[in-house]
Structure formats: structure tokens, C-alpha cells
Amino acid sequence: MSLLKSNSVQIGQSTTGTNNFTLSVPSSPDGTIKLARGNSGATTADVLTVNASGAITGATINGGTITSGTAVASTSGTAIDFTNIPSWVKRITVMFQGVSTSSTSIVQVQLGSGSFATSGYYSASSDVSSVVSTSTSTTGIIFTKNNGAADVRLGTMTITNVSGNIWIATATSTITNSAVTGLSSGNITLSGGLDRVRITTVNGTDTFDAGSVNILYEG
């Protein structure tokens, strides 16, 4: 029995390329295999991908699939970015673990399509302890209003697609070094499909100095 080896196989012989499918592996194989619509050797549109661990992603089968990003230490820099978020994603969860900054600017999340949107948001946050204090932002979605340089934050923000490029978010947080609970929400309409998330501060210059951040995304 002969063995046929190829990095790409076309399925179908239609004169209309989008009626055909291509089954392929990367030119430098890494255990990933893709099924795409289109002709082999031409521009194709991915339908589904199976990685080396058997995890499946794709526009037609992503319901219920939750994909984890790689946790990033929030110990330096003014921003933490997660990029290359797939176009089929409808919900993103940002997770904050022991996050601290160098000064007093509020921690917030920015979304983007090709580049990060730095305006056009509406966001409000309330911190509850012995008193209630509030804050708003138009440059991002506030994670927690509490903004002391010594504050250590934990909690989650859930960002959900309403329709088209409209996204809303809600967050709950705790300041571990004080009896403070934070509640916040916000929204933005992006110029195109969401493909990136940034964690930063309102002034954009305070640096992170403790903790870690990660995301989960799902269709």
C-alpha cells in the first residue's frame, strides 16, 4: 500500500472556489490541522481548526467551547494586551488576580478592532465599603474605581456582544487589602469586529507592579 504525503489536500472540483474545501497543516507542522473553504494554494477562509491537544475552534462549532488565553504577569508596563481574538467570539471574561499599580489612576479595559479604541465608551463604577463612591470613564470600561497605589485587586469582567460591533461589559471586584467591593459596567460600539483587549489605567502612564491577568473567550 502506497502512502501519500501532503501538507494540503483540496476537496471538491467546483469552478467556484468557495464551493471547495481545503484540509491542511502548517508548512512547519505543529500538530494543528485546518479545514477551510476555498481552493488549495489560494486564499481560504477557515471553517474549523483542531490543535495538537484536540481542542476545536471554528465559526460553525464554537458554541460552548471556552478557550483560555495565557496568563500575563501584571508586574511591569502600562498596558497588558491580548490580541488575535477570533472573529466568532461573542463573550470574553477578563480575570484579575492580585493586580496592583504604581499610583492612583483607575484600572480599566479597552477593546479594539485593528487598533484599540481610546474614546467612545460609557462606563461607570461604584465602590462599596462604609460609604459608596462612584466614577465614570469615556476612554475605557472601568474595572474598579478604587485607585490607591497600595490597592490589590481581584475579580472578573465579562464582555458580551449585543449585536454587530456593539459590546457591553459588567465587572465585580474586591480590594484585598481593604473592605471594598466594586461594581461596574460599560459599553462601546467598535468600528469593526473585536480582535483585541487591553488592560490599562485611565491616565495610561501608571505602571503595573503586582499580580496577573488572563482572559477566557467563547462563541
Image: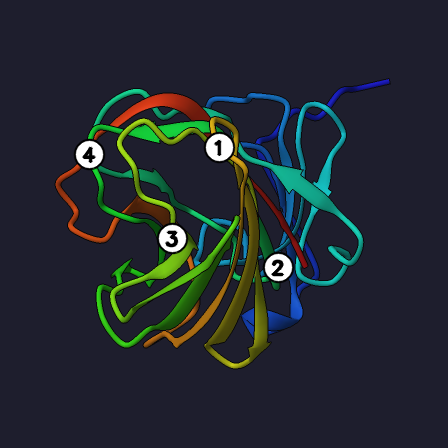
Compared across the picture, whether 5 is left or right of 143 comes to right
Which residue type does callout 4 highlight? Ser
**Of helix, strand and loop, which one carries label 2?**
strand
Residue behind mark 2 = 91
- Of the image marks 3 and 4, the number of the one nearer the N terminus: 4
Residue 4 rendering spot, x and y as whole percentages: 71, 26
Kind of residue sitting beneath label 3: Lys
Mark 3 vs mark 4, CA separation in Å: 13 Å
Quarter assignment of residue 61: bottom right
The N terminus, quarter of image: top right
The residue mark sitting in front, 1 or 3, is 1
Name the residue beneath numbered marker 4.
103
Residue at screen point 26% across, 65% down: 117
Cα distance in 3D space between marks 4 and 2: 31 Å
Residue 184 position within the rendered picture, expressed as x and y whole percent measured from the top left: 50, 61
The residue that mark 1 highlights is: 178
